[in-house]
Amino acid sequence: MGEKTFVRNDGREEHAFSMNLDMPTEHMQKIFGLQDQYIKKLERDFAVTVVDRNGHIVVSGEEEHVKRAASVLQQLTILSDRGNEIEEQSVDYAITMGKEAQAEAITEIDGDCICHTVNGKPIKPKTLGQKQYVDAIRNNMIVFGIGPAGTGKTYLAMAMAITAFKNDEVGRIILTRPAIEAGEKLGFLPGDLQSKVDPYLRPLYDALYQIMGAESFAKNMEKGLIEVAPLAYMRGRTLDNAYIILDEAQNTTPAQMKMFLTRIGFGSKVVVTGDASQKDLPVGSKSGLDTAVKVLQKIDGIAFCNLTSKDVVRHPLVQKIVKAYDEYEAKENRRTKTHYAGNNPRR
């Protein structure tokens, strides 16, 4: 490790800092990626050069950039050594954290395993935002998880609910969603009421199958220990000793949200998830999620976790789409405010 001097083609001297890292071959194959696509991304983002010299990785460039890139590589090596698959999302987030000099947080997050899927895959938070969300669920009776698609709001809440159920911390799991039509009308769908609302609850079923297994899920459904139902079915009930998840909460009305939150009984825990940017309510209607954020902010025992595009763990393109929409909507809001101010001068 140290500074080296190179002579460029134009005769000028150039100074470069370098660091040597030991990386076993099996980890190197994962971290470099197919056709070195991950390491090329790291080189580009940190403006460094990474070279493999017989199992020794040499990172060179400006000192600060080299140290941060090397820290990212060290953390990715630890992840790989723990048996994790190194995916594009893992590399992208590690680079993001490395730029903020927080690369060490990656392995701290990875140490928090909530449970395993039926296939034995561990379910863990993958970002700092997700880790804070999981911790908030552990430490509060009611948690609002608010953020864009792909941030793991519902999936992590489901994992926490199933873990609590298996550990006998609660007696049942109740999953609910408002049955709001996203551009289509329920009345035109064939079948009875249950078959009409099932498509809106399908994401909840999918997560349950993956984490719990279809057979275990079916048995607990028959016993009434797991319930998946539209929000309207919650009216008039008191829900004791239950883990309750309200999904797609941005599509509730203020009255529905109040009704739901006042159903909660002793020994229960509630997670409310929603994406304020994807409302399917009629034009001009207020969202129960937006109202709850304003009304309940100062109440002890209620936590609000705001996930962002940084916490998206789906395909990297989803993160870019979310970020692009956020920037577009912020720009449109500024334009609208400027237009309004221009047409309403002070008198």
Image (cartoon, grey):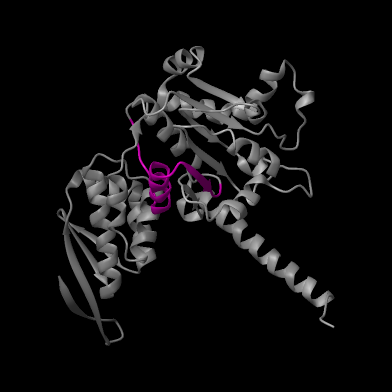
- The location of residue 65, given as percent across then percent down, is 30, 70
Nearest the eye: 297 or 304: 297
Q: Residue at x 46, y 47 (%)?
A: 301
Q: How many marks?
A: 0
Left or right: where does residue 243 sit relative to residue 285? left
Rendered position, 76 above or below 177 = below
Q: Residue at x 82, y 80 (%)?
A: 345
- The location of residue 19, given as percent across then percent down, is 19, 67
| Location of the N terminus (image quadrant) | bottom left
Q: Quadrant of residue 59?
A: bottom left
Nearest the eye: 150 or 33: 150
Q: Is residue 88 visible?
A: no
Q: Which residues are magenta?
A: 121-148
Rendered position, 92 above or below 279 = below
Q: Is residue 240 visible?
A: yes
- The location of residue 228, given as percent across then percent down, is 56, 24
Left or right: where does residue 177 sit relative to residue 315? right
- The location of residue 26, given as percent across then percent down, is 21, 43
Q: Is residue 216 magenta?
A: no
Left or right: where does residue 265 sit relative to residue 69? right
Q: Residue at x 64, y 29 (%)?
A: 200
**Residue furthest front in the image:** 266
Q: Residue at x 23, y 42 (%)?
A: 82
